[in-house]
Image: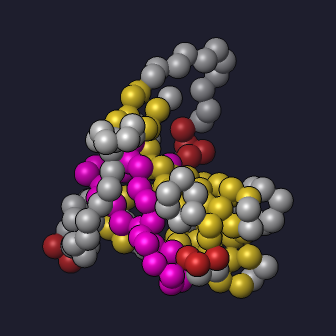
Amino acid sequence: MYADYQPEGIDPSVDTIPLHIAGNSPDPVATSSEKLTAVTDGGLDIKVDLAAPLHTGAASLLPFRIEREGEQLRATALSPYLGAAAHLILIHQTCKDFLHVHTEAGTGAPVVAHTQFEKAGIYRMWIQFDASGIVHTADFTLDVKEATPAHTPMQHPAHHHG
């Protein structure tokens, strides 16, 4: 379990708390296939797509197409949630690296975020945002590849905790 917090006037912190749960572990193969589309919970079905090849190295752009009833939402359609338009949590499948990312301030579509992946591999990701007074959560499985010179991502600042 991760506790991600930032007391006023202090740098952000992440505490890792091991939990031991009885029973069988889920099949790891079930979470190793890339999943780049999700439908949120919360009563209003909202479809969220992530369309970007992801690589290690420099900061990666994460553009999210958020649709309600087939219409793309702009960032202005999202209400501030915990001080940002949206929050992303990414956890590496094997080493359990934890990234907390905020979307970029702005009014456009798609809604975008930036982060830097230090390690290649499978990541689980959740994005949370407030649309129409309801906090929605969408989940993804990302396959981050090792960067090659032909896939050097754009340089952008990243906000993450590790």
Magenta residues, start to end: 98-124
Res 57 quadrant in image: bottom left
Q: Residue at x 39, y 37 (%)?
A: 7
Residue 72 picture location, percent across and down: 65, 83
Q: Quadrant of residue 128?
A: bottom right
Give whichever of 44, 11 is nearer the camera. Answer: 11
Splitting the image into 4 quarters, where does residue 37 fall? bottom right
Which quarter of the figure is the C terminus placed in? top left
Q: Is residue 119 located in the magenta-colored stretch of the structure?
A: yes
The reply to whether the magenta stretch includes residue 105 is yes
Q: Position of residue 80 (x, y in %)?
A: 57, 63
- What residue is rendered at 37% in x and 58% in y? 144
**Left or right for 157, reference 78:** left
Residue 109 image point, x, y percent? 53, 83
- Give the residue displayed 79% in from the left and 79% down from the top: 69
Whether residue 132 is visible to the viewer of this picture, yes or no, is yes
119 left or right of 68? left
Up the image or down, 119 lies above or below 24; here it is below
Give the residue at x 21% y 77%: 150
Residue extending farthest to the right is 43
What is the x, y in percent for residue 97?
35, 40
